[in-house]
Image (spheres, helix red, strand yellow):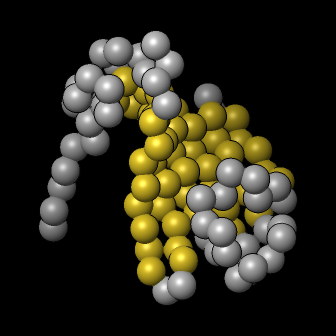
């Protein structure tokens, strides 16, 4: 088993916390499906696929905040054409 730390893309800190978890579940190429969002112990379920990292299937998106510099970034896991990808997205907030 391999285990790596998720580092802040801005300051390289090891101290990151995820605070928002989203899952997207749909059949291939469907316009709607099940979207689950959990933030601050509040669970929301709807059919909105906006924000799904996969253009065609399932996806997971985790939003992180750095404890050191307070910047926010996301990690997405998604399927596309039989492959599973992990992407990160960072937009500087300061």
Q: Image height check: is 70 above or below 81?
A: above
In which quadrant of the rendered view does residue 28 lie? Answer: bottom right
Image position, residue 14 (x, y; %): 22, 30
Q: Is residue 13 left or right of residue 53?
A: left
Image position, residue 23 (x, y; %): 62, 57
Image position, residue 16 (x, y; %): 34, 30
In which quadrant of the rendered view does residue 60 lie? Answer: bottom right
Q: Image height check: is 81 above or below 69?
A: below
| Residue occupying image coordinates x 68% and y 51% | 51
Q: Image height check: is 49 above or below 25?
A: above
| Residue occupying image coordinates x 46% and y 13% | 94
Q: Is residue 92 left or right of residue 20?
A: left
Return the residue nearer the eye: 60 or 69: 69
**Number of residue marks:** 0
| Residue occupying image coordinates x 67% and y 75% | 56
Return the residue nearer the eye: 37 or 29: 29
Quarter of the image with the N terminus is bottom left
Judged from this view, the residue extending furthest toward the bottom is 82
Q: Image height check: is 85 above or below 41?
A: below
Image position, residue 89 (x, y; %): 47, 43
In which quadrant of the rendered view does residue 33 lie? Answer: bottom right
| Residue occupying image coordinates x 76% and y 58% | 49
């Amino acid at each position: 088993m391999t285990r790596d730390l998720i580092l802040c893309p801005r300051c390289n800190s090891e101290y990151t916390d995820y605070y928002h978890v989203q899952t997207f579940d749909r059949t291939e190429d469907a316009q709607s499906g099940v979207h689950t969002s959990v933030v601050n112990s509040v669970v929301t379920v709807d059919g909105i696929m906006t924000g799904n990292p996969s253009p065609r299937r399932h996806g997971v998106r985790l939003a992180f905040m750095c404890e050191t510099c307070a910047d926010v970034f996301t990690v997405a896991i998604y399927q596309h054409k039989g492959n599973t990808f992990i992407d990160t997205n960072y937009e500087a907030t300061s």
